[in-house]
Image (cartoon, rainbow, N blue to C red):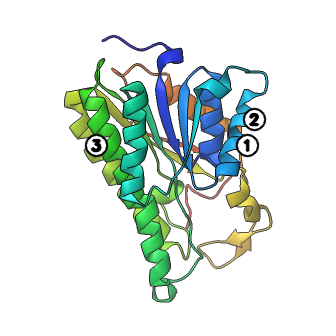
Amino acid sequence: MDTPTPSSRIALVTGASSGIGRACAIALLREGWTVWLVGRRAEALQEAITQAALGHPDVAARAHPVVADIGDPAAVERTFAAVRARHGRLDLLFNNAGVFTPAATPDATALEHWHQSVQTNLNGAFYCLRAAFALMREQSPRGGRIINNGSISAHTPRPGSIPYTATKHAITGLTKAAALDGRAFDIAVGQIDIGNVASDMTERMGAGVLQADGSVRPEARMDMDAVVQTFMAMVRLPLEANVLFTTVMATKMPFVGRG
């Protein structure tokens, strides 16, 4: 199978405004990919592109910021239609965008928060995967790679996290089903499950978070570079090989044996 060179490869990263999505989009840009950065905040997307361009002056020509809510299927269709119109192909989708709503027991979980989690974490991920699949199976060379951002919560919940945990368990099913369906079209689908990476979302972990035994304790975090290295290792594989699931986590975080 012919494989496009890095400079001609096209990637789309959701949730690229901050955190994991931003860091992985920057890594792709610096490795020569053309990257569509999708997020809700135009200023933050531009900041990511500016950061990626430091020492890499050619980045600006390969970076395409898109302000869109992946929970809106029409916005997703418009975004992928723009990719198709400009490049005629997509080689990589990083299905990364997600939200974590306020902690609560099931009975105290606001329906608004449940629907918000499902719409972004699950429906949005499916909308993007669906659109990527349609493009990848038709393009020439055929195929591509889709990486879904699962979570440690795709395996084991935290207290008070039922919307997030349910949607992340569902992402595992999405990954398995899409990986199976993708075989016939050279579409490799995998999942990266990340635990306690240092970011704005996990800042509170240093001060202490609720544990399954009711205690509140600080948790270890890892540098973002560990996630980026793991993600890029998945990206660099030929389509004949796929990391179906991988977990990268802070070594001392309470995951194994949680609860």
Which is more toward the observer, 81 or 125? Answer: 81
State which quadrant residue 46 falls in: top right
**Left of 157 or right of it: where is 51?**
right
* SS label for mark 1: helix
Q: Mark 2 sits on what residue?
A: 51
Residue at the spot x=36%, y=26% of the render? 88
- Check disc 3 and give the amino acid type: Ala
Residue at the spot x=45%, y=57% of the render? 154
Crowding near the residue tagged with mark 3, few <14, some 14–19, many ≥20 C-alpha atoms within 10 Å: many
Image spot of residue 106 (x, y percent)? 46, 83
Residue at the spot x=64%, y=54% of the render? 41
Which is more toward the observer, 180 or 77? Answer: 77
* SS label for mark 3: helix
First in sequence: mark 2 or mark 3?
2
Q: Quadrant of the C terminus?
A: bottom right
Q: Mark 3 sits on what residue?
A: 178
Crowding near the residue tagged with mark 2, few <14, some 14–19, many ≥20 C-alpha atoms within 10 Å: some
Q: Quadrant of the N terminus?
A: top left
Residue at the spot x=59%, y=20% of the render? 32
Mark 1 and mark 3 residues within 8 Å of each other at the beta carbon:
no
Image spot of residue 166 (x, y percent)? 41, 67
Q: CA distance from mark 1 to mark 3?
A: 33 Å
- Check disc 2 and give the amino acid type: Gln
First in sequence: mark 1 or mark 3?
1
Image spot of residue 19 (x, y percent)? 66, 49
Which numbered marker is on residue 47? 1
- Check disc 1 and give the amino acid type: Glu
State which quadrant residue 254 falls in: bottom right
* SS label for mark 2: helix
Indicate which label's residue lies in the foreground, 2 or 3. Answer: 2
Which is more toward the observer, 208 or 72? Answer: 72
Q: CA distance from mark 1 to mark 2?
A: 6 Å
